[in-house]
Image (cartoon, rainbow, N blue to C red):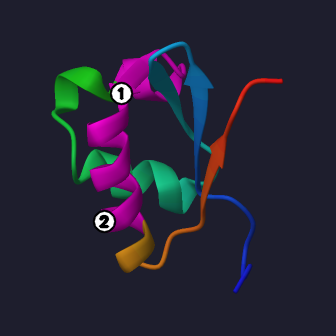
């Protein structure tokens, strides 16, 4: 179901995941779920989520039709 590539990526960084929008759709979706004050942090890839929050975000995004890549460090 890869209609337009990855919309959001979550990269493991220790005990958290770095959240990065990868498409305009991903960014718009994030803007509907986070406060305006966090948008600059989201755009710069500075937001990190704990595993439980990451699980919820992935589930919600995928239910909305977004493609989410959950990556582990090598």
Spatial CA distance of label 2 from label 1 is 14 Å
Residue 10 point in image, percent of width and height: 56, 38
Label 1 sits on residue: 49
Residue 15 point in image, percent of width and height: 45, 17
Q: Disc 2 on helix, strand or loop? A: helix
Crowd class of label 2 (few under 14; some 14 to 19; many from 20; radius 10 Å): few
Residue 40 point in image, percent of width and height: 39, 20
> Which of pointers 2 and 1 lies earlier in the amino acid sequence?
1
Q: Which stretch did the figure color magenta?
A: 40-61
Callout 2–callout 1 Cβ contact below 8 Å:
no
- Please state if 49 lies on the left or on the right of 2 as rendered: left
Q: Disc 1 on helix, strand or loop? A: strand
Dividing the image into 4 quarters, which one contains the C terminus? top right
- Above or below residue 6? Residue 62 is below
Identified at 36% across, 78% down, the residue is 63
Q: In this rendered view, identify the residue nearer to me: 74 or 66.
A: 74
Q: Which mark is residue 60?
A: 2
Prevailing secondary structure class for the magenta stretch in the rendered image: helix
Dividing the image into 4 quarters, which one contains the N terminus? bottom right
Residue 59 in magenta stretch: yes
Residue 64 point in image, percent of width and height: 37, 76
- Please state if 10 lies on the left or on the right of 65 as rendered: right
- Above or below residue 49? Residue 53 is below
Identified at 23% across, 54% down, the residue is 32
Residue 14 in magenta stretch: no
- Please state if 53 lies on the left or on the right of 8 as rendered: left
Q: In this rendered view, identify the residue nearer to me: 36 or 14.
A: 14
């Amino acid at each position: 179901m890869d209609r337009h590539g990855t919309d959001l990526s979550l990269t493991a960084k220790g005990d958290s995941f770095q959240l990065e929008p990868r498409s305009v759709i991903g960014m718009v979706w994030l803007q509907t779920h986070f406060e305006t004050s966090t948008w600059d942090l989201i755009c710069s890839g500075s937001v990190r989520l704990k595993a439980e929050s990451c699980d919820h975000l992935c589930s919600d995004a995928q239910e909305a039709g977004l493609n989410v890549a959950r990556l582990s460090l090598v």
